[in-house]
Amino acid sequence: MRATATVSVICVALLMGSAQAAERELGKVKSKALAEVSGMAASRVNKGLLWVSNDGDSGRVYAIRTDGKMIVELRLPVRVLDVEELALGPGSEDGADYLYVGDIGDNDSRRFEVTVVRFKEPMIGSEGGEVKVEQAEQFRLAYPDGPHDAEAMFVDPESNSLFIVTKEPQGGRLYSVAINALKDRVRSELTLVGRVNADSVSGGAISPDGRRIVLRREEHGWLWNRRPGASVAEALQGVPQVVTVRGRRQGKNGEAVAFRGDSAAYYTLSEGKKQAISEFELPPQ
């Protein structure tokens, strides 16, 4: 196994500083089907749309507007067990965005494999309904050191690699696999590339320009700025800024976070009925 990068993160708010992101409430989720949102990704080709998923095995991904209105429900063509995260990233077609559905939850740490489902992001009209995803790949992933529970996943647009951060009370582990190494229905082994001294991580995202990384737990989050040429593991060695990830009218159990398409703000959403969608504007880097 190659040497891992040690991610040194001081988790005391007074030492970290704050990004001082300004909150704006955009609307409230209007669909009763979305009561346990855990994954979120902001579309870049469908302006004003968020992809969201519930925690669990429903096999559904939903497109909602940033004001909370439901637009379309996508049915996955494969079986999933515990979806926790969504991400957007590159795929097999150059210049296209793909949705990555992270079936990576494992509360009891018993799964010897987790899976990630990938399909090309569809163009969505103003009104949708229910649509079945016709073509999707399912990647089987195994940790090199046994099962782990995880709820955070993102795809780095610079290295074209998928990253998973485990959920652990004393700090998570950072695993990675190259996108071009993934094959449909074939098992691939993740590589441990670092440790993250951010505890109980329940969600994560990387900005579309690859310059910012955010991880969160229920009540607060951490933001890293990535210098040009630095790997994700190297970026996470820096001391992060504490950022707000729960809006004034959001529930306590928050997991979902996603960057806006211009990388200058991020969205958050909590579990529960009729939850508020919050947008946090970031200061320029």
Image (spheres, helix red, strand yellow):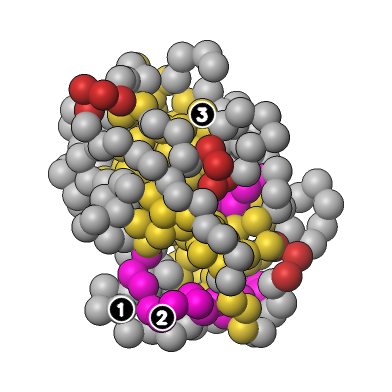
Q: Would you say residue 164 sits in the magenta stretch?
A: no
Return the x and y of residue 13 as percentages of the image width and height: 22, 28
Q: Is residue 138 above or below residue 5?
A: below
Q: Which residue is mark 1?
A: 109
> Is the Cβ of the residue at disc 2 closer than 8 Å to that at disc 1?
yes
Pick whichever of labels 2 and 3 is earlier in the sequence. 2
Q: Position of residue 48 (x, y in %)?
A: 54, 34
* Mark 1 residue type: Ser
Residue at position x 21%, y 22% in the image: 14
Whole-angstrom CA distance, mark 2 to mark 1, is: 8 Å
Residue, far right: 94
Query: Whole-percent x and y of residue 154?
Result: 53, 52
Q: Quickly name the residue at label 2.
A: 146
Magenta stretch, residue numbers: 132-157
Q: As drawn, is 37 to the left or to the right of 161?
A: left
Residue 174 at what x, y percent from top left? Answer: 46, 57
Q: Residue sitting at 36 percent across and 73 percent down?
A: 148
Side (left or right) of 186 relative to 274: right
Give SS at disc 1. Answer: loop
The CA span between labels 2 and 3 is 31 Å
SS assignment at label 3: strand
